[in-house]
Image (cartoon, rainbow, N blue to C red):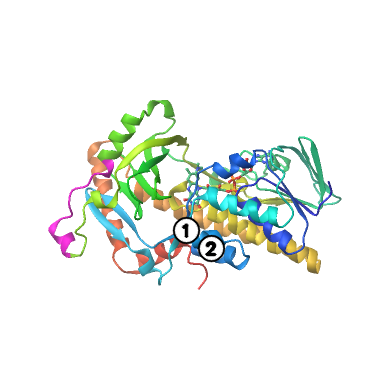
Amino acid sequence: VRTQVAVVGAGPAGLVLANVLIRAGVDAVLVERRSRTDVERRARAGLVEHRIVEYLRAHGLADRLLSDGTRHGWCDFLCTGRLLRFDYAAQSGGVRHWVYPQQLLVRDLVAALCAAGRPPEFSRPAVRVHAAADGSGPARVECAGLDVDCDYVVGCDGPQGVTAQALPRQSAPRGDLDERYPYDWLTLLAEVDRVVPGVVYAVHEDGFAGVMPRTSRVARLYLEIPAGDAVSHWTAARVHERLRTRLSGTRPSGAARRRGAGRSAAEAVPRLGRIVETGVLRMRSRVRQHFQHGRLFLAGDAAHVLTPSGAKGMNLAVADAADLADALIRRYRDGDEAYLAGYTSRRLPEVLRTRDLAAGFLDLLHPQGRQPADRRAALAARLARITELAEPGAAGAAFAHWYVGAGPD
Ligand code: RFL
């Protein structure tokens, strides 16, 4: 087939890009390795930033998100048995997150493409991408059973995709853009007896644990484990035991109660039932220095992978897609090549800023130390920083603004 833009990968980045292009009259063909059922079932992210929802709404892509999603404006930190509420909506001028599972957003975006008459080509893995290094001539994506000839290729095929392999090797050393953390996270989906009222970050000397709302029946949980540890070491019984240790808190001190924090940890975390999915996330971040070369572009996890600590991956993926859609539309509508050429230089600073802030947040959640005394000291320092965030002030406001994706003022 022949099209203007070939999009590889039906995750949030590829689906948003294809939808926005087609609605603007730019022809696009999206190819996806997996089946439709598989992509619509893959549970991953769930916190959608305010500015991303506004973008999807403006393009008519947020109807179900707005009707079925829930709003969240605070999270709890459970630190050394104390429960501290961070009311980021209050600190960001009333802006809140939307909670809407990624697989539901993917389902909605697939349905929108089908309704627009350009359903994704499912079960078509791209095997090779051709794009002239100097940007001249047409490009081509070779897929199983289908070749797509096009003007531009956009790789939205995640960190292990094939599109990035068509980019020239990076000339400068990448060391400063890659980071491996000294721990991993177990990623779990567990049944809950009631909806998780808000995100809980438990900072404990045994290690980090996190609880994120997803649906009324299922929560996303994270558990810090030693780097490289195998998922098979983590039986359900062991997971439950560790979660109990890390998520149990004593009632707040008298002083904290007087500040209005008179809640117990049991109130913050619902009763956890059957674990329905267990995975392991090797904790690293990797940001490419170039998101484009000639007629080839990368968006989302194909260009940068961050840890889930700040819940930014899906949001950045959609933000990349939004920028690139705008640039491609300008290219076809006005012949503006220069704006398209500036894609990396517009996106990279935000990605690096997000990477740094997410790394800082990760540090807050992971007091490290070889000896128990070092860990206790690190924990006390984290408690002081979390307390500062939770109190109204400049530190809390800056973090709140970033965390919720309040967007430009
Ligand atoms: P995706 O979603 O990985 O989609 C890539 C798609 O490309 C397909 N593909 C190919 N198709 C054709 N040919 C090939 N050769 C192909 N190779 C691959 C794949 O099948 C797939 O369908 O990338 P995209 O669109 O860039 O979106 C990125 C997000 O999915 C990711 O950043 C987030 O899920 C990260 N993330 C979170 N982000 C948030 O913003 N908020 C969160 O709360 C949040 N929680 C999470 C997360 C990621 C997690 N994991 C498992 C990594 C929680 C978890 C557990």
Q: Does label 2 or label 1 sit earlier along the sequence? A: 2
Callout 1: CB less than 8 Å from ligand 1: no
Residue at x 35%, y 55% (from the top left corner)? 198
Residue at x 64%, y 47% (from the top left corner)? 10
Residue 295 is one of the magenta-drawn residues: no
- Nearer to us of marks 2 and 1 is 1
Callout 2: CB less than 8 Å from ligand 1: no
Classify 207 as above or below 27: above
Q: Position of residue 164 (x, y in %)?
A: 68, 42
Tag 1 residue = 69
Taking the image as shown, residue 242 lies to the left or right of residue 48, namely left
Is disc 2 in contact with disc 1, using a CB cutoff of under 8 Å?
Answer: yes
Residue 252 is one of the magenta-drawn residues: yes
Residue 89 sits in quarter: bottom left
Q: Circle 2: is it few (<14), some (14-19), or many (20+) Cα within 10 Å?
A: many
Report the front residue among 140 and 393. 140
The amino acid marked with disc number 1 is: Gly
Residue at x 41%, y 52% (from the top left corner)? 360
Element at badge 2?
helix
Q: Could one spot residue 182 in this view of the protein?
A: no
The amino acid marked with disc number 2 is: Val
Q: Position of residue 92 (x, y in %)?
A: 40, 69
Q: CA distance from mark 2 to mark 1?
A: 11 Å
Residue bounds of the magenta highlight: 246-258
Q: Position of residue 176 (x, y in %)?
A: 54, 46
Q: Position of residue 192 (x, y in %)?
A: 35, 44
Report the front residue among 42 and 369. 42
Element at badge 1?
loop
Q: Could one spot residue 209 in this view of the protein?
A: yes
Report the front residue among 55 and 281. 55
Numbered label attached to residue 53: 2
